[in-house]
Image (cartoon, helix red, strand yellow):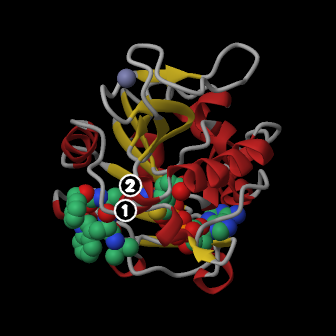
């Protein structure tokens, strides 16, 4: 677990920094990753890419809610870890700082990060399956049962396999990636597109790209530097 002199210099001098995070950044808070243990996340015998799919919303919305309510249950009490906290400190350190996350747990915001680009939505929000009206949880942490505008069914406001990302979110992230000087790829397996294309855009535009992950990923090869370790242990080394 070592930060090169080159990276320390670039980190000290950079004006425009972009961070892309994935499930690994929340692992040390106790949120299970999707593909840990050999791609094995399963809910009631269904693989997560089956239950977390656009098709399942059509076929069995109550089952989708059961799966998301279960996860909302254990995510309610979790806290940001040292990685979220360090990333939150970075936003005031650079002239332009962009945080792009694939996570839906809201832990970056809990740690104090502002203007987080959530590519895959947020588990604490629902939206109407008909009129698309957004619903945040009520102050007591409960989700509404039906649309408050039109009374139709709600669904989790998350992006499932085969669904489009929120309008403009990827485009904004891609634009920031195309002009950042330093790009961190933290705790993602780099398998899900278009999110996994962001470091490639940054690299193609000449940014220095650094991955932080205990394991190598398909993105490791395009990175200038790979720091092998846990996000909560590696990231605080920057401010120290
Ligand atoms: C640590 C750690 C520690 C552990 N510290 N690290 C191009 C090619 C092929 C396919 C496609 C393509 N473009 C689009 C597609 C289709 C599809 C896709 O990418 N499929 C691939 C899997 C093949 N993409 C989509 O469908 C996307 N939509 C789209 O492109 O729309 C246009 C379109 C429509 C129709 C047809 C075609 C195109 C939408 C993707 C939505 C993803 N949604 C999910 C579920 C959210 C809801 C839910 O939570 O249930 O989002 S899938 C899941 O994967 C979740 C995550 O955000 C996402 C990424 O996972 P992540 O974060 O990388 O986690 P893991 O578990 O994979 O990895 C964890 C990593 O952490 C590991 O590397 C560990 O080593 C590491 N780690 N501890 C640091 N302490
Ligand atoms: Zn509605």
At a point 77% along the width and 37% down the height, the residue shown is: 76
Q: Quadrant of the C terminus?
A: top right
Q: Residue 90: horizontal and vertical position, in percent?
A: 54, 34
From the viewer's side, name the closer residue of 111 and 14. 111
The residue beneath circle 2 is: 58
Q: Is residue 159 above or below residue 144?
A: below
From the viewer's side, name the closer residue of 234 and 2. 234
Q: Is residue 136 above or below residue 225?
A: above
**Figure quarter occupied by ligand 2:** top left
Q: Quadrant of the N terminus?
A: bottom right
Evaluate whether residue 143 shows in this view: yes
Quick check: 132 left or right of 134? left
Q: Residue 154: horizontal and vertical position, in percent?
A: 47, 33
Within the image, what quadrant is residue 158 found in?
top left
From the viewer's side, name the closer residue of 32 and 209. 32
At a point 50% along the width and 73% down the height, the residue shown is: 226
Quick check: 116 left or right of 66? left
Mark 2 close to ligand 1, CB under 8 Å: no
Quick check: 202 left or right of 156? left
- Mark 1 near mark 2, Cβ–Cβ under 8 Å? yes
Mark 1: few, some, or many residues within 10 Å (few <14, many ≥20)?
A: some
The residue beneath circle 1 is: 55
Q: Is residue 145 above or below residue 61?
A: above
From the viewer's side, name the closer residue of 226 and 84. 84
Q: Is residue 201 above or below residue 99?
A: below
At a point 64% along the width and 74% down the height, the residue shown is: 41
Q: Secondary structure at mark 2?
A: helix
Q: Residue 9: horizontal and vertical position, in percent?
A: 46, 51
Q: Residue furthest right?
A: 77
Q: Residue 191: horizontal and vertical position, in percent?
A: 40, 73
At a point 49% along the width and 22% down the height, the residue shown is: 135
């Amino acid at each position: 677990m070592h930060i090169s002199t080159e990276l320390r210099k670039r980190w000290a001098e950079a004006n425009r920094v972009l961070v892309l995070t994935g499930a690994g950044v929340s692992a040390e808070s106790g949120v299970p990753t999707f593909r840990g243990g050999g791609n094995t996340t399963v809910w009631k015998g269904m693989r997560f890419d089956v239950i977390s799919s656009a098709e399942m919303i059509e076929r069995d919305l109550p089952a989708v809610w059961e799966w998301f309510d279960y996860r909302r249950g254990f995510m309610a009490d979790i806290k940001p870890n040292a990685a979220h906290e360090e990333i939150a400190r970075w936003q005031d350190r650079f002239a332009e700082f962009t945080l792009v996350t694939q996570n839906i747990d809201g832990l970056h915001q809990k740690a104090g990060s502002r203007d987080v680009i959530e590519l895959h939505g947020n588990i604490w929000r629902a939206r109407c399956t008909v009129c698309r009206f957004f619903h945040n949880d009520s102050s007591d942490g409960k989700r509404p049962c039906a649309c408050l505008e039109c009374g139709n069914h709600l669904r989790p406001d998350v992006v499932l396999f085969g669904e489009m990302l929120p309008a403009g979110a990827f485009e904004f992230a891609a634009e920031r990636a195309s002009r950042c000087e330093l790009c961190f790829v933290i705790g993602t397996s780099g398998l899900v597109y278009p999110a996994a294309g962001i470091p490639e855009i940054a690299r193609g535009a000449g940014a220095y790209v650094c991955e932080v992950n205990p394991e190598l990923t398909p993105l490791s090869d395009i990175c200038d530097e790979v720091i092998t370790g846990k996000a909560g242990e590696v990231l605080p080394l920057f401010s120290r």
